[in-house]
Structure formats: structure tokens, C-alpha cells
Image: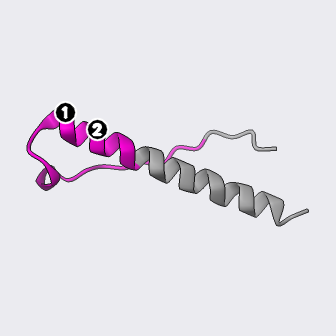
Amino acid sequence: MLNETIVTPYTEDFSSTFLAAERLRLANEGAIRRNIETFINALIEKSSGF
């Protein structure tokens, strides 16, 4: 059905938190959210072609 790699960059601003570990966690969570959103949109686009 979907055979492609989804890569969506996401960065967290330094102002969001001073601690690097916390900023990394927030950036990872943001990237996961964007990847899921992109994946769902890709599925919608593919399914509308049927």
C-alpha cells in the first residue's frame, strides 16, 4: 500500500527549555507527531485514488 520512507524534520527552540535532554525529548515527540500526520495524509491521498 505505502512503500516509502517518511521523513519530516522538527526542531525545538532553545527557549522551550534550558535542559538539553528535555529539549531532545520534546523534539523527538514533535517529530513523531509530524511523521504520523504526514503518514495519515499520505494514506488519505492514496485511498482517494481508488
Relative to 41, is 3 on the left or the right? right
Residue sitting at x 74%, y 39% = 3
Residue 16, percent from left and from top: 16, 53
Outermost residue to the bottom: 48
Could you tell me the amino acid type at mark 1? Ala
**Neighbourhood count class around disc 1 (C-alpha, 10 Å): few under 14, some 14–19, many 20 upward:** few
Q: Quadrant of residue 41?
A: bottom right
The residue that label 2 is drawn on is 25
Mark 1: secondary structure = helix
Residue sitting at x 48%, y 53% = 34
Outermost residue to the top: 21
- Tags 1 and 2 touching, CB below 8 Å: yes
Q: Relative to the observer, which residue lies in front, 23 or 3?
A: 23
Answer above or below: position of 34 versus 21. below
Residue sitting at x 20%, y 39% = 22
Residue sitting at x 58%, y 44% = 6
Mark 2: secondary structure = helix
The residue that label 1 is drawn on is 21
Relative to 34, is 38 on the left or the right? right
Q: Relative to the observer, which residue lies in front, 9 or 34?
A: 34
Residue 20, percent from left and from top: 15, 36
Relative to 29, is 14 on the left or the right? left
Alpha carbons under labels 1 and 2: distance apart:
6 Å
Which quarter shows the C terminus? bottom right
Q: Which mark is residue 49?
A: none
Residue 34 is inside the magenta segment: no
The colour scheme applied to this rendered structure is: one colour
Residue 31, percent from left and from top: 42, 46
Outermost residue to the left: 18
Write the start and end of the magenta stretch as one range: 6-30
Could you tell me the amino acid type at mark 2? Arg
Residue 13, percent from left and from top: 20, 53
